[in-house]
Amino acid sequence: MEYDVFSSTCPSRPVLEDVTGRWGALALGALADGPLRFNALRRHVQGVSQKMLAQSLQALERDGLVKREVQSTFPLQVEYSLTPTGEVLATKLLDLIAYLRGSMPGIVEAQQSYDKARAQADKARAQTDKAHAQTDKARAAQADKAHAQA
Amino acid sequence: MEYDVFSSTCPSRPVLEDVTGRWGALALGALADGPLRFNALRRHVQGVSQKMLAQSLQALERDGLVKREVQSTFPLQVEYSLTPTGEVLATKLLDLIAYLRGSMPGIVEAQQSYDKARAQADKARAQTDKAHAQTDKARAAQADKAHAQA
DNA sequence: CTCTACAGTTACTTTTGGAAACTAGTCACT
DNA sequence: AGTGACTAGTTTCCAAAAGTAACTGTAGAG
């Protein structure tokens, strides 16, 4: 059997989404430098809700990329850590993230020039739309005149 | 200035989502082995809708990771290709995807054993819930008796 | 005796994603 | 002049996903 993420029915698709998804990627990245408990992880991955963190961790645990260990000491601690496979994926993710961080200055610049160009284009389009509205109005006036004559 | 994807307000967060998001990652991956036109890309990334592909490509273009070139030949073709930064990110993504593909057998196995364990746990919980329902019923009966006596 | 921390779950709301129809511009055929 | 085809999208509408906030339940601190 051959796995291909570009095929819509391949079982690897949902796994890729778990790994590269919004919170999954950050959870894996956070666990890369050591095991963490639920709330510690929540503090580390800023902005994640309890619900989504629980959901992402459950998905990663199901995929065998994260190990969940309940410590029955008080107050009921749960430690999350990476499995060997999870560790490799986390490393690759962190590598990507590191490169992204290095490229941020250029990316921000690209975004700004894109937004500026778009603003210009929108303004230009508003002008032509206005012109079209004018010609439409003129056409309507002509039609009215024709109608009045009839 | 220091960029950190783990911070909720960092500008790198949305960019990471563009790159690792569901369709963004596959679009970058597909463009890694040569430029493609819109519909060719759509055929390559199976299951993507026109709307989402257009949206993802616009985001990647804005981030300066993908270049969009309109060819004014008939019938109006648009070619998408990777910028140097996009190319590096695509390579890293494909590396991650390749490793994921190699790990799929183990992952599928993990999913199956997880699902099996969950099914067991759910069954067990249904049992205790049933027991609780019984005791609740008994308690209600006691309360009714007491009420009838009063 | 209230307040906090632990690890979640549940109910409700808002945002997003996907399917299908529609737009726009150009040619080719009839 | 009208019809249809091909391109690359946009729009519309509804279901699915994500986010918000409140609740569960135990126990230690102040």
Image (cartoon, coloured by chain):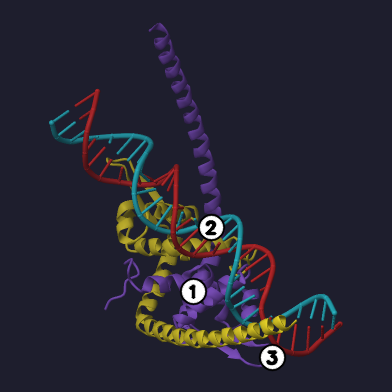
Chain colours: A purple, B yellow, C cyan, D red
What residue is at 50 percent from the left and 88 percent from the top? B124
Displayed quadrant of residue B107: bottom left
| Position above or below: A115 against B103 | above
Locate residue A13, reporting x and y percent.
38, 70
Residue at 55% x, 53% y: name it. A109
Asked whether the beta carbons under mark 2 and mark 3 sit within 8 Å of each other, the answer is: no
Quadrant of the snapshot with the C terminus of chain B: bottom right
What is the chain letter for disc 3?
Answer: A
Viewer-nearest residue: B55 or B10: B55
Q: Which residue is mark 3?
A: A74
- Mark 1 vs mark 2, CA separation in Å: 20 Å
Which badge, 2 or 3, is on the more N-terminal residue?
Answer: 3
Badge 2 local density, few (<14 within 10 Å), some, or many (20+)? some
In the image, what residue occupies the spot 51% across and 68% down? A99
Q: Earlier in the sequence, mark 1 or mark 2?
A: 1
Q: Position of residue A140 (x, y in %)?
A: 44, 18
Considering only order in the chain, which callout, 3 or 1, is on the residue closer to the N terminus? 3
**Within-10-Å neighbours for mark 3: few <14, some 14–19, many 20+:** few
Look at discs 1 and 3 and give the one toward the viewer: 3
Kindly tell me whether residue B24 is visible in this rendering.
yes
Q: Dot 2: what SS?
A: helix
Q: Which residue is mark 2?
A: A106
**Element at label 3:** loop
Residue B68 disc label: none
- Where residue D11 sits in the image (x, y, percent)? 45, 42
Amino acid under disc 1: Leu
| Location of residue B37 with respect to A138 vertically, above or below | below
Marks 1 and 3 sit apart, C-alpha to C-alpha, by 34 Å
User: Given the image, what chain letter belongs to the residue carrying mark 2?
Assistant: A
Disc sitting over residue A93 in the figure: 1
